[in-house]
Amino acid sequence: MKFISPLLILVLCFITGCQNTGEPKESTTSSIDPEAYWGENPWPEIRKQRINELLPQALKAAEVDCWIVICRENNNDPIADHIGGENAGGTAAFLFYNDDTGFHSRVFSPSGEATALADLKIHDTVVPVERGTSAVKKAAEFIKAQSFKSIAINSSSTNSIADGLSYSQRMDLEEKLGEASKLLVPSTELVYQWLSVKLPAEVDILRKAAQLTADWQIEAYKQVVPGQSTDADIARFLKQKMATYGVKDGWSPDQNPNVNSGADRGHSHATDKVIMPGDVIQIDFGIKVYDRWVSDIQRFAYVLKDGETEAPEDIAYYWESAKAGNRAALQAMKPGVKGVDVDRAQRVLMEKAESDYVMWSTGHPVGYVAHDVGPNLGGSQASHVRPAAQKVIKEGMTFAFDGFHAWTLEDGGVKTISVEEMAVVKEDGAAYLISPQEDLILIP
């Protein structure tokens, strides 16, 4: 994305900001029809493609023959809408498996819902199960007639998305499987392998979301009137943009966006702190588009003091240090390396730049949620390394990741510049989804 020069910002603010009362101005964006802007939701077709192209590979990578997901009404499995089970009423059993003839999907569905499920054309076979008959029992009978050596179920101690099978559901399944219940294994690795990789069409959607997220932050900074505007004012402006475009929060609405012109607050809400000259402002912001894909981008600005035309030497140094860390992480992010190695690449620069310690990981997968399934980009300086940090990065994975520089403020608080961008891993390395922030935004 293109960034406005400091001189142009000064001119714009002189023309429009002198009359500003400190409250964010109403958006000048023309009326948006969100349905027309976003168009038809591409998820149904993308879901089919993910099931037919990526899931067979994930089964092989996880060394699993068959995966059973049990869906139901009101308290559904987290994976349900990834497999077409989001509309389950009565209990339905979804099976995915590889055999000598290829990949197959078979669903045992209550008869009252089987017709609509079959109409979606997601699965090879939808077997209607009459009222009063257990779909799980039918699935168990099918499984026992096969020669599967392993059957994945959604019981996981490390991945909440792979932990949707309740205790009572598991007991029921084990009872119906009998001796075959010995073949049950957690779906942790399978779900990891499947969800961590995104299709090119999904990357394109994430790119559009990332661009809007960054553009709106730049627009939000134009609203700042030092000595009058508050962090919360700027957050409200971004909420207005979200409403105009019909998108949702990338994470908890109370903490999105996090606008912070003071000392570090971690994952937090924007407060009524007044933005003052000399402040470094952080906006950590994410949106959810099509009620599915999530962005996570940060942009930073510096509020000029009287007589200043650029950031002072120390602030400029902190910015360049953090930016260098982000660039080093991108260079290290390539197929075959571990998440912890990406973290180490930018931590080395932090040490050379004499940054204060930062407890956060360098980065995390982003896609269906802000902290998605995939390798954690952290752990090189932690007392222990998360298991996900030892995972190998693959082509098609998408990340939000930072370059850090932290320093101690005069009042004893700590301030961190965390240059957060989004990237996709390609065959020969990683690439930014959008143009990264090169310079601090200067606010007169």
Image: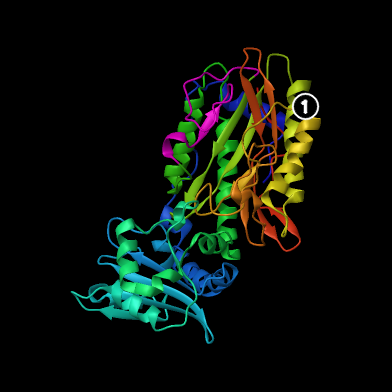
Quarter in which the C terminus is drawn: top right
Badge 1 amino acid: Glu
Q: Is residue 412 left or right of residue 172?
A: right
Residue 267 sits inside the magenta stretch? yes
Vertical comparison of 42 with 377: above or below: below
Q: Is residue 136 left or right of residue 57?
A: left
* Place of residue 179 in the rendered image (x, y in percent of width and height, measured from the top left): 38, 74
Q: Is residue 28 visible?
A: yes
Residue that extends furthest to the right in the rendered view of this protein: 352
Which picture quadrant has residue 417?
A: top right
Of 52 and 315, which appears nearest the observer? 52
* Place of residue 136 in the rendered image (x, y in percent of width and height, measured from the top left): 31, 72
Q: Is residue 19 left or right of residue 3?
A: left
Residue 372 sits inside the magenta stretch? no
> Start and end of the magenta stretch?
252-278
* Place of residue 268 in the rendered image (x, y in percent of width and height, measured from the top left): 49, 30
Q: Is residue 26 visible?
A: no
Q: Secondary structure at mark 1?
A: loop
- Would you call the spot at circle 1 few (<14 residues within 10 Å), some (14-19), or many (20 or more)? few
Main secondary structure along the magenta-highlighted residues:
loop
Residue visible at 51% across and 19% down? 273
Vertical comparison of 105 with 284: above or below: below
Q: Is residue 204 left or right of residue 170?
A: right
Residue visible at 63% across and 40% down? 384
* Place of residue 289 in the rendered image (x, y in percent of width and height, measured from the top left): 48, 53
Vertical comparison of 330 with 308: above or below: below
Which picture quadrant has residue 438?
A: top right
Mark 1 highlights which residue?
Answer: 354
